[in-house]
Image (cartoon, rainbow, N blue to C red):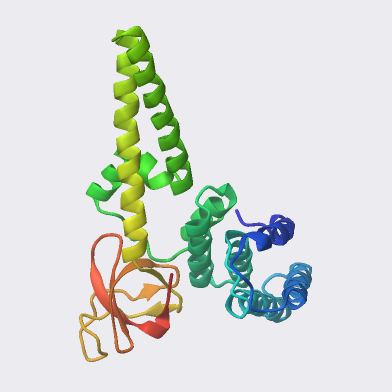
Amino acid sequence: MITKNSTVILFSLFLFSLTTSTTAKLPEEQTYSLFSQANEYFRQANSTAAGSKQAEKLYEKSILSYEKIINDGQIKNAKLYYNLANAYFLKGDIGRAISNYRRAEILDKSDANIQKNLTFARSRRIDKVKEKTEKRVLHTLFFWHYDFPIKTKFLITCIFFAIVCISLTSILWLGRVAPIKLTMIISGILMVCLLVSVAIEVSGQTGRTCGVVTTNEVIARQGDGRNYSASFKEPLHAGTEFDLLEHRAGWLHIRLGDDSEGWIPDTSADLI
């Protein structure tokens, strides 16, 4: 569960992650000033009655400061997006909370806090889109491909490569000892599997655009216009995630997790 206190503690991590970001366009002093403002607005919102208009305004001010750091300062890192997502969530904006958790996840898939808060935010959505059985089976069988961060997979690949090299050297010196040969074969297979996984993930990241519905509700249609019939019986709600198939003159052609498709106005969603 996303708590106010744990969120405040994580603000301090921005100071460390700032140094690993791209070159900032805002002066460093202004960037830290904006960060301090966002932090203070957030603390004030947390000390105000939950759900009150005053708390909502303070969260909005905190969000504006974070977004200025991201957009004008060109600073994009997992901790900053995570803090922004927490502010959106506590403000009650599930759609933008999920989209920013997703951005944080892309930058740091190994962060357990990001995964936990993203899962919790998803549980608060209205729409319950179930993945097709085939996708669920693939996620179960190849969990290491879907769940492991790309850096972790690359590191494990290097370890298996080292084992293969050591095993091969041992065979050249000691002959074809069965245990060593078996170790080399298994390590080689796992190394190739992980390399393929890394290649697939890299190619997928470059060619795939995802998004999240951010308006309270939107009617998905069968074409790029309001005169087309609705694609689903019910409208889509904030927080529903999709893959982008096409972007055309104010409309997004989207595919949901169950492979159903529709068109929604591009103002009703946030692309990742």
Residues 59 and 174: in front is 174
Q: Residue at x 40, y 30 (%)?
A: 160
Determine if residue 139 is in view. Answer: no
Instruction: Determine whether, in the image, residue 46 is placed left or right of residue 99.
Output: right
Instruction: Determine whether, in the image, residue 81 is placed left or right of residue 248.
Output: right
Measured along the vertical axis of the image, is residue 14 above or below residue 224?
Answer: above
* x and y percentages locating residue 163 in the rendered image: 41, 25
Please state the total of marks drawn on the protein image.
0
Measured along the vertical axis of the image, is residue 251 above or below residue 6?
Answer: below
Quarter of the image with the C terminus in it? bottom left
Q: Residue at x 69, y 75 (%)?
A: 62
Q: Residue at x 42, y 45 (%)?
A: 147
Residues 57 and 252: in front is 252
> Where on the picture, by quarter, is residue 18?
bottom right
> Where on the picture, by quarter, is residue 81?
bottom right
* x and y percentages locating residue 27 in the rendered image: 72, 78
Measured along the vertical axis of the image, is residue 253 above or below residue 46?
Answer: below
Determine the residue located farthest toward the front in the rendered image: 173
Residues 120 and 98: in front is 98
Q: Residue at x 51, y 72 (%)?
A: 96
* x and y percentages locating residue 121 in the rendered image: 52, 60
* x and y percentages locating residue 230 in the rendered image: 24, 80
